[in-house]
Image (cartoon, rainbow, N blue to C red):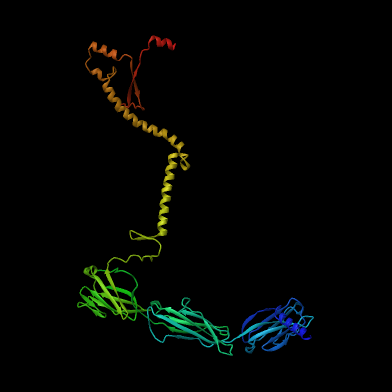
């Protein structure tokens, strides 16, 4: 029966061990010679603090701070058991455990953390295809291996200084049996392009035990056919008749290209010149990075040269490219903006993008609105035109006076015709005319009975000058009233 309490106590110790200990950090990576603080804590006072570091057990006393592993924490009464390791040794790589016995009782709780003492890995190794050159479109694969690190190193791929993200595979970490050193390997795959030519593929390894990253690299050599830098026919501007002219064509190719110029029936392969040496073809000039400049020199530009189309064929082992060139004596137009996905409209040689078109439309609408508002305000005497109606009324009197003068002149002409048609007793013309018969005078007197002539003098007259033709006559007709009407008025 004594066996049962022993088994129960062992089971209880197993359950309690490590269950109530808060330990931090749970894992740490340090270089040899670095320091580390490990803290174990329980929610009740403890009797003592013991730590096992590198297989050696240390009883830590808060008052003793002279050892290489000393106590750290607020005190045993607060349930804290901490260790300050001043200088880490490489052989201490492994677990660090703490034991915290309570004030009363025989069951102590324990906790553990993982300490990795960093060890620098070996140099990275870049493994790839042994062939020295590749073609555009080839599938390229490389592997980077960084051996024997503790912990495993970190691998990053670069193409020149640009980090590669696409085509990077998951890393694989392995270790030898019985060794805590780890080897990491990672693959990268890529479909090669012309832009990859001349660039350096870099495998960069980083590790806590290294002062700086280590690298392994290889340069990529990619062959591709000649490629033009601009589409369509090429126009050479700024040439002058009678002067030397140069036809330059820039392209890219690898391996180096061979050029051939066609001028009508003449074919020139650099370095060469025509029979009259009026055209000289130069060797392709390498600008670096697979870019070349191919030039044809015209010693004297003639009018027939401007009317002619020049053809250039560029070839290498992988293909060819053809160019058509025209000459122009006009100045080269301003560089056009690169056309992107947004709308561009060309108006009289000026390209307008979407923003400019919208701005012009808005400006035109605002102008039309402003014109409408001004016309509306002036027509209705509103806003800034509201005070001008009174001024217009005042000035209308002056304008009426001026317009009256024009009306008077028109009335004068009309009255002159009327006076010529109507006989007047006071007219000076009648004095010179022969006297009419008595019967006629009597008939005339009967016709003019009740007619009164009034002479109107318009405008001021000057005595020194003859009166202007502004004298008007008005005919006033008086009618006799019947006796009945007179009685009604009275």
- Is residue 66 in view from this perspective? no
> Percent from the top left, x then y, of residue 469?
30, 27
Foreground residue among 89 and 80: 80
Foreground residue among 391 and 170: 170
Quarter residue 82 falls in: bottom right
Quarter residue 325 falls in: bottom left
Please state if 87 lies on the left or on the right of 450 as rendered.
Answer: right
The residue positioned farthest toward the front in the image shown: 1
Foreground residue among 433 and 189: 189
Foreground residue among 467 and 235: 235
Q: In this view, does 347 lie above or below 435?
A: below
Residue appearing at x 39%, y 77% in the figure:
193
Residue appearing at x 44%, y 34% in the figure:
393
Please state if 2 lies on the left or on the right of 118 as rendered.
Answer: right
> Percent from the top left, x then y, of residue 355?
42, 59
> Percent from the top left, x then y, of residue 150?
58, 86
Location of the N terminus by quadrant is bottom right
Quarter residue 258 falls in: bottom left
Please state if 333 lies on the left or on the right of 144 as rendered.
Answer: left
Q: Is residue 232 above or below residue 12?
A: above
């Amino acid at each position: 029966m004594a066996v049962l309490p022993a088994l129960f106590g062992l089971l209880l110790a197993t359950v309690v061990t490590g269950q109530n200990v808060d330990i931090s950090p749970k894992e740490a990576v340090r270089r040899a010679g670095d320091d580390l603080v490990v803290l174990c804590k329980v929610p009740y006072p403890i009797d003592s603090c013991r730590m096992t570091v590198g297989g050696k057990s240390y009883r830590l006393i808060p008052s003793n701070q002279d050892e290489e592993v000393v106590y750290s924490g607020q005190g045993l009464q607060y349930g804290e058991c901490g260790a300050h390791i001043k200088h880490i040794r490489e052989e201490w790589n492994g677990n660090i455990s703490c034991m915290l016995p309570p004030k009363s009782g025989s069951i102590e709780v324990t906790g553990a953390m993982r300490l990795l003492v960093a060890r620098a890995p070996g140099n990275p190794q870049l493994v790839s295809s042994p062939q020295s050159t590749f073609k555009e479109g080839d599938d390229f694969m490389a592997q980077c291996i960084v051996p024997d690190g503790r912990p495993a190193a970190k691998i990053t791929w670069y193409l020149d200084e640009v980090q590669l993200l696409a085509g990077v595979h998951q890393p694989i970490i392995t270790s030898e049996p019985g060794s805590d050193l780890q080897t990491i390997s990672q693959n990268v795959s890529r479909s090669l392009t012309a832009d990859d030519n001349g660039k350096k593929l870099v495998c960069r390894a980083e590790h806590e035990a290294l002062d700086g990253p280590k690298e392994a690299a290889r340069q990529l050599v990619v062959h591709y056919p000649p490629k033009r830098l601009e589409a369509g026919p090429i126009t050479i501007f700024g040439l002058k008749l009678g002067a030397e002219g140069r036809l330059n064509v820039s392209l890219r190719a690898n391996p180096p290209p061979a050029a051939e110029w066609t001028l009508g029936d003449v074919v020139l392969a650099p370095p060469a010149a025509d029979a009259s040496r009026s055209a000289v073809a130069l060797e392709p000039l390498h600008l670096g990075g697979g870019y070349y400049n191919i030039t044809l020199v015209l010693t004297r530009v003639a009018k027939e040269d401007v009317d002619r189309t020049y053809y250039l064929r560029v070839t290498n082992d992988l293909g060819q490219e053809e160019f058509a060139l025209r000459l122009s004596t006009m100045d080269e137009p301003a560089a056009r903006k690169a056309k992107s996905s947004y709308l561009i409209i060309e108006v009289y040689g000026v390209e307008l993008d979407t923003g400019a078109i919208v701005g012009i439309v808005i400006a035109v609408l605002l102008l039309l609105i402003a014109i409408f508002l001004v016309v509306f305000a002036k027509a209705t005497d509103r806003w800034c035109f509201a005070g001008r109606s009174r001024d217009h009324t005042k000035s209308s009197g002056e304008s009426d006076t001026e317009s009256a003068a024009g009306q008077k002149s028109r009335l004068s002409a009309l009255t002159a015709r009327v006076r010529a048609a109507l006989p007047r007793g006071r007219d000076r013309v009648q004095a010179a005319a022969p006297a009419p018969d008595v019967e006629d005078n009597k008939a005339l007197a009967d016709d003019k009975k009740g007619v009164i002539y009034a002479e109107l003098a318009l405008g001021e007259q000057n005595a020194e000058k003859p009166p202007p033709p502004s004298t008007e006559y008005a005919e006033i007709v008086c009618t006799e009233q019947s006796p009945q009407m007179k009685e009604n008025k009275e």
